[in-house]
Amino acid sequence: MYRIAVIPGDGIGTEVVPEGVRCLLAAADAFGFSLDLVEFDFASAAYWEKHGTMLPSDWQPTLEPFDAIFFGAVGWPSVVPDHVSLWGSLLQFRRVFDQYVNLRPCRLLPGVRSPLADRSPGEIDFVVVRENTEGEYSSIGGRIFEGTDRETVLQETVMTRHGVDRVLRFAFEYASRRDARHLTSATKSNGISITMPYWDERVAAMAADYPSVETDKYHIDALAANFVLHPERFDVVVASNLFGDILSDLGPACTGTLGIAPSANINPERRFPSLFEPVHGSAPDIAGQGIANPIGQIWCGAMMLEHLGEEAAAAAVLGAIESALSEERDALTPDLGGTGTTRSLGAAIAGRLAD
Ligand code: NAD
Ligand code: IPM
Ligand code: MN
């Protein structure tokens, strides 16, 4: 029995999470384990409207006993500004639960058309390991001379040896277990002349401990171009918080749609629950229409099952996604070129798990 906190959040989060749950329950049934799912309404604009905060004051002891958190998306800028809603919820979870690795796979799946002509599954299959608790996402800074023509705004980038080394170690370990054993570091040490050379230095030091992993580095601008021009070059890509954020939207765009991309916010030491959420947000432009692609959320379910030690069930969920994509063309959502709905695609994938 696994205890899972379910937080749908805002917008399409509330549409894709039920499909993720449907597939998790189908996998549990098929593989003989049980899930105790407890849903929470906080970390949403609706909760904010009612309570004036994004989270109840006891959110930490409430969530901490769970084995994992299955999360949709948060952010509804017409009701609450994004920096308030995000720093009041998701970014708190990541920091307080020390989920310092954000693992974001990008894979071209069968039946999905890459915008990069002539690519086929196998050619795009890499993972972004994003530093998730420090870097450019710091709260250090402020405004001075406000309201004058000398108004100045500063926000510091924070890189600690502890913070950089632990995410690099995770990335090198992860790369050493993959077939290609290749690691690319995202840098910008030509322009950002203090923190980024430090990042490079720590990558070089860590690489010495992993002689079996081939290592290279690209400046972030060139790396972005190479994601599009030569995605087959990449296996594990390790990046600071902001660079990882950007690359992990670009990667899935190269594989056809942001709607399929999963992410795992992991506390590798398992002192705290890890959190599994799609890469995408609440998508206000399509929310309420029932057409959001649920695959990102369902793939998150697979990552969560793997984290819980249910490897066979995780592989089955991924297999069900792949076979539904190739064989259930009518069920596919519009971002995949189909005319189906969130529910039809969720049902097609869950149905394959029950077979
Ligand atoms: P977004 O990811 O919500 O949407 C970007 C584009 O991708 C939109 O055109 C959207 O329709 C499309 N898209 C996203 N998910 C899709 C899916 N499952 N199926 C089909 N199409 C999909 O990014 P945004 O518009 O910049 O942000 C909207 C809100 O979500 C903001 O409040 C933002 O801060 C928040 N956000 C939250 C998270 C999170 O909770 N982890 C992540 C990103 C953005
Ligand atoms: C993500 C999101 C968040 C981030 C935002 C919503 C704060 O874009 O999970 O990728 O930048 O980490
Ligand atoms: Mn992002």
Image: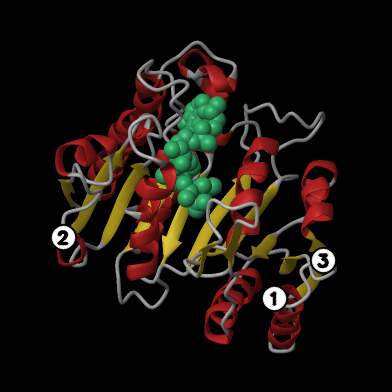
> At 62% from the left edge and 47% from the top edge, which residue is drawn?
106
Alpha carbon separation for disc pair 2 and 1:
35 Å
Say which amino acid is labelled 3: Gly
Q: Quadrant of the N terminus?
A: bottom left
Q: Name the residue beneath numbered marker 1.
A: 195
Where on the picture, by quarter, is residue 122? top right
Can residue 355 be seen here? The reply is: no
Q: Is residue 311 left or right of residue 2?
A: right
Left or right position of 48 against 114: left
Q: How is the image coloured?
A: secondary structure
Label 3 Cα crowd, 10 Å radius (few <14 / some 14-19 / many 20+)? few
Residue at image mark 3: 191
Give the class, few, some or many, for how many residues have Cα within 10 Å of label 2's Cα (few <14, many ≥20).
few
Position of residue 147 measured from the top left corner of the image (x, y, whole percent):
54, 51
Q: Residue at x 38, y 78 (%)?
A: 269
Q: Picture coordinates of residue 93 (x, y %)?
A: 33, 61
Q: Residues within 10 Å of mark 1 (few under 14, many from 20)?
A: some
> Who's the residue at 74% across and 88% down the image?
208
Amino acid, disc 1: Thr
Q: Nearer the viewer, residue 119 or 256?
A: 256
Disc 3 versus disc 2: distance between alpha carbons? 41 Å
Under mark 2, the amino acid is Ser
